[in-house]
Image (cartoon, rainbow, N blue to C red):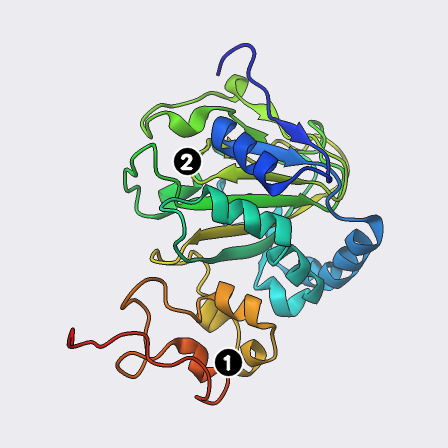
Amino acid sequence: MTATATIPRLTASATAEEIAAALRDHGAVIVEQLLDATTCDRLQAELEPWVASTPVGADDFSGRNTRRTGGLLTKCPTSAELVAHPTVLDVVDQVLWPSKTTFQLHLTQSIAIGPDSPAQFLHRDHWCFDFFPFPRDIDVEVSTIWALTDFTEENGATRVVPDSHRTPDDVRYQPEDTLPAEMPRGSVVMYLGSTVHGGGANRSDQMRIGINVDYVLGWLRQEENQYLTYHLDEVRAMPERLQRLLGYQPGAYALGYVDGGRSPMTLLDGGSGEAQTFRPDGA
């Protein structure tokens, strides 16, 4: 990281084009207070019983004093406002490559880092694809972490290495190369799957709570299995935009179809919706 590197910081009035440009240029961007206090209060109230019943991580990477609660769309219904936030989706659509392809929800989880927690191992989120060496000019994943408590260096704000997204995967960074994504409650830090980052050390006496929502190209496997996380009847009750984000639309031509060529969306409306997407015999 260069001595002048910073995490770009924008206000909630920033356009998707401005946010996308900062994300492409530096691999990470903070948008301050994109959520209001009322929405944050509702999210915390919905999450509280689930976080309390979630076990702590089983290893150092997951965090032995960190509670990660997944499948948020039904446990925490207000999280749908984050998952389908129009500005965020517009940014994702502009940044992922190849452009104009489908993208889908990769995962949802709340991350509650408890007091006296060490920093997480620095990593790139796209390593989940079995460490495949994606070319540096291809962005397949966008990650977001929304702050439900103020994120400070003391309480474990996510640490990011700005401009690391264009360096090879075998480049190793040290904690001193990182910057804390400090931001007030209701803000979001967005970063690419190729950007080096990690949860910070929580040296405070309070829990740091964020909501992690990631998106990935439609032709890659999702980290959180969305088809088993939610029952089909639960998915049917969701807005169409969420259904598509969950993966119930073809991920690309001839990818993810049912019944010899139908879109999976037809399973959600009784078969009266989208028509056959292609002819499997090539005719």
Q: How far apart are marks 2 and 1 (CA)?
A: 33 Å
Asked if residue 71 shows in the view, the reply is: yes
Asked if residue 62 shows in the view, the reply is: no
* On-image quarter of the C terminus: bottom left
The answer to whether 248 is drawn above or below residue 272 in the figure is above
Q: Please report the residue visible at 51 percent of the width from the left and 27 percent of the height from the top.
A: 26
> Callout 2, which amino acid?
Ser
199 with respect to 218 (left or right): right
Q: Please report the residue visible at 44 percent of the width from the left and 40 percent of the height from the top.
A: 193
Helix or strand or loop: what does disc 2 sit on?
Answer: loop
The quadrant in which residue 146 appears is top right
46 with respect to 87 (left or right): right
In the rendering, which numbered label is found on residue 194? 2
> Callout 1, which amino acid?
Leu
The answer to whether 73 is drawn above or below residue 128 in the figure is below
Q: Please report the residue visible at 64 percent of the width from the left and 30 percent of the height from the top.
A: 181
Q: Please report the residue visible at 61 percent of the width from the left and 58 percent of the height from the top.
A: 84
**How many residues crowd around disc 2 within 10 Å: few (fewer than 14), some, or many (20 or more)?**
many
The answer to whether 265 is drawn above or below residue 70 in the figure is below
Residue that badge 1 annotates: 232
108 with respect to 135 (left or right): right
Please tell me which residue lies in front, 99 or 69: 99
